[in-house]
Amino acid sequence: MSENTRTTTGSTVAAPDARPTPPPSTRTPSGGGLLSGSIGRNLGLVVAFALLCIVGIVTAGDRFASTDNVLTILRLAAVVGVVSIGMTFVIIGGGIDLSVGALVALSSVWATTLATQAVAADVHWIVMVGTAVLVGAVAGLVNGVVIAYGKLVAFIATLAMLAAARGLAEIIANRRTQIVQDQDFLRFFSGSVLGIPTLVWMFALVAVAGWVLLNRTTFGRRTFAVGGNAEAARLAGIRVQRHTVALYVLSGVTCGIAAVMLMARTTTGSSTHGTLLELDTIAAVVIGGTLLIGGRGTIVGTVIGVLIFTTLSNVFTLNNLSSSAQAVAKGVIIVAAVLLQQRVAAGRRQRRSSKALPPTAAEGAPAGASPGVPAP
Amino acid sequence: MSATRQRRRLWSTAVCLVGAGAMVAGCTGNTPEASSSGGGGNNAASSNDDTGDTVTIGFSAPAADHGWMAQITAAARAEADSYDDVELVVAEGTNDVSTQISQVETFINDGVDAIVLLPFDGAALTPIALEAMQAGIPVINVDREFNDPDAARVTILGDNYGMGVSAGTYICSQLGDQPDAVVAEVAGIDSLPLTQERSQGFSDALADCGLDVDNRVAAEFTVESGEEVTANLLQAAPQIDALWNHDDDQGIGVLAAINNAGRDEFFMVGGAGSANAMRSIQAGDSVLQATVIYPASQAADGVRLARLVAQDKALSDLIDVEVPRRITLSAPVVTADNVDQYIDSAFES
């Protein structure tokens, strides 16, 4: 996994090597097969990302490989990345959240109203951060409650939230761009710690926290179980509805965090923030190997997926190519990565099932999708 | 038993709704309203402003999702309000072409006296505008042109090509003696003809002094996209002499990216002419040195023209007894020297 070292985020790179071992209590395949499995699972992605980096180095040379440029790529990846982590949870849990872009807009607008900024000026800029995260969380809660208890299809419920949240953001902002006045806020979030931008640290922290939550906690195991087979999860004693709500709240919180990051990046809150963010995040999550029907997925895959898209637009701009060509390349990459991913997964599945593993493994659900997940 | 569960579910729903309501009622205050310019004209001494037959004017424009477009609709409303004899019917702003077509169909069915139309896409709205004209309803085409001259009675538009020329000429005047100067361009939505015209005018004007566009990226008129493409652009061009950004709304993001990268070796020219940009130019505290105006008052002018056409009046400062077919507004360059003249009519982004 040498290309991961290129990304300079020390904390996220640690993840892929640690990822392979699923919860020891639920799974008992042989260790050697698993290690190759983890590389295999993200092989399509890793190859695509490495190819992209090679193209970048060949065509743009030092301009691509410079520290500044790598940090620029990571900084641009940060916002999409944070939201994609939340999206990964929702999709693994068998749902989808189309409202993320609108929630980012709403959170950023709410956190930059004159009223909020006035309070923040009196108290501390942390008020703006708190407001953004709270707004995201509450909107996520509404999503979750409507889906879990109102029995609405996630696609429709979050589509409704997409429209409503952006509309509300426009009403609050009066369709104006709201400038962030608090210089301390801007200094903190657009600054660097140990030479790495704060935004990149935030992305790394969220990614690591997401990885731990997904792979090392009961919450994560339940997420796989709920997404893999909700009925089986319910029979196993998981409170599926409550868990679903939690997943959407989690996604809302990541939207709030992303809103703060975007406010720092652009020095504004605006109802146009996060336009089409839902598509970018879903694309990143899906090429990251997460199944759209739920039950399977990885944080590492999502992170690489986000990096691929951000690096792609960087390489295109470095070579002075048009955004239309970029869109075409993006489409090709989505299809190619997913196809490659499927081939690799299919190959692995055959090898595995020939080793006579339990039937659940043959369904390609690597981590804890079996109904035998520990009860609460 | 199922009844109690039902009730509990109702309760939890109610609690959520109340909670959401409390959030909404919370801190969304955003008090200062930008006072929109406009107001009944008092230009030429004529009887044009006297109250005439009451006319109903249908108005449709794209979604007011950025400052310039918001000001377009706000100014049109304000202009209509200032006349006693104008009733403006405003359709909900939309970026969906088929929705906008159906809005115009509704205007035709309602038999309005005139239609002021700022199409999201000029070509796509041409057939329905033709239909309106054939139904005897004069159409005033604002900003984005139809591809058939018969589809509009009057066309009033900002000079997109001229904007590019103004920006290019200004950059030439600053860099004319340096043929290897690096010029960068941050365009708006690339698929719109107006963006292509601006870029064409820009490169034509630059060519006159031996310069060309070395790096070009396209954003989407939003702050976020402006920041994103500029961050990449600044990596692509380690040394820049001049940068033209098509749109001051996205320009906030462009400036943020420039600040984040700590770059100040070049000067920047804006576009559209927002109040924000003009304040920056006035203060002289950033790389933004000039901006090119693209009037946000053109839909308001469209409403005035629609009223004149519907009431069979003429433009009072011209001798001709008919309203002209086509009006192209000027695209002047605003710098620190003349910013005072323009800042009051600028739009807030």
Image (tube, coloured by chain):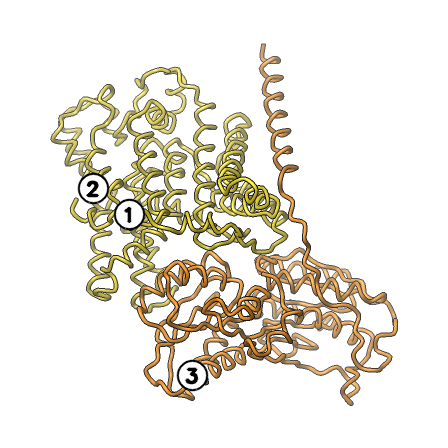
Chain colours: A yellow, B orange
Residue B215 picture quarter: bottom left
Relative horizontal placement of residue B44, taking residue A332 as reference (left or right): right
Relative horizontal placement of residue B259, taking residue B116 as reference (left or right): left
- Assess disc 1: are there few (<14), some (14-19) or many (≥20) residues with their C-alpha within 10 Å of its C-alpha: few
Residue B263 marker: none
Q: CA distance from mark 2 to mark 3?
A: 52 Å
**Can you tell which of label 3 and label 1 is closer to the viewer?**
1
Q: What SS does tag 1 mark? A: loop
* Residue type (three-letter) at the residue carrying disc 2: Val
Q: CA distance from mark 2 to mark 1?
A: 38 Å
Residues at circles 3 and 1 in contact by the CB criterion of under 8 Å: no
Provide residue A83's location: percent of width, then percent of height.
41, 42
- Assess disc 2: are there few (<14), some (14-19) or many (≥20) residues with their C-alpha within 10 Å of its C-alpha: some
- Assess disc 3: are there few (<14), some (14-19) or many (≥20) residues with their C-alpha within 10 Å of its C-alpha: many
Residue B206 marker: 3
Query: Badge 2 is on which residue?
Result: A344
Q: CA distance from mark 3 to mark 1?
A: 43 Å
Relative horizontal placement of residue A186, taking residue A353 as reference (left or right): right
Provide residue A178's location: percent of width, then percent of height.
56, 53
Residue that extends furthest to the top in the rendered view of this protein: B1
Q: Chain of mark 1?
A: A
The residue under the point 24% across, 43% down is A10
* Residue type (three-letter) at the residue carrying disc 1: Leu
Q: Both on one chain, marks 2 and 1?
A: yes
Quadrant in the picture for the N terminus of chain B: top right
Query: Badge 1 is on which residue?
Result: A194
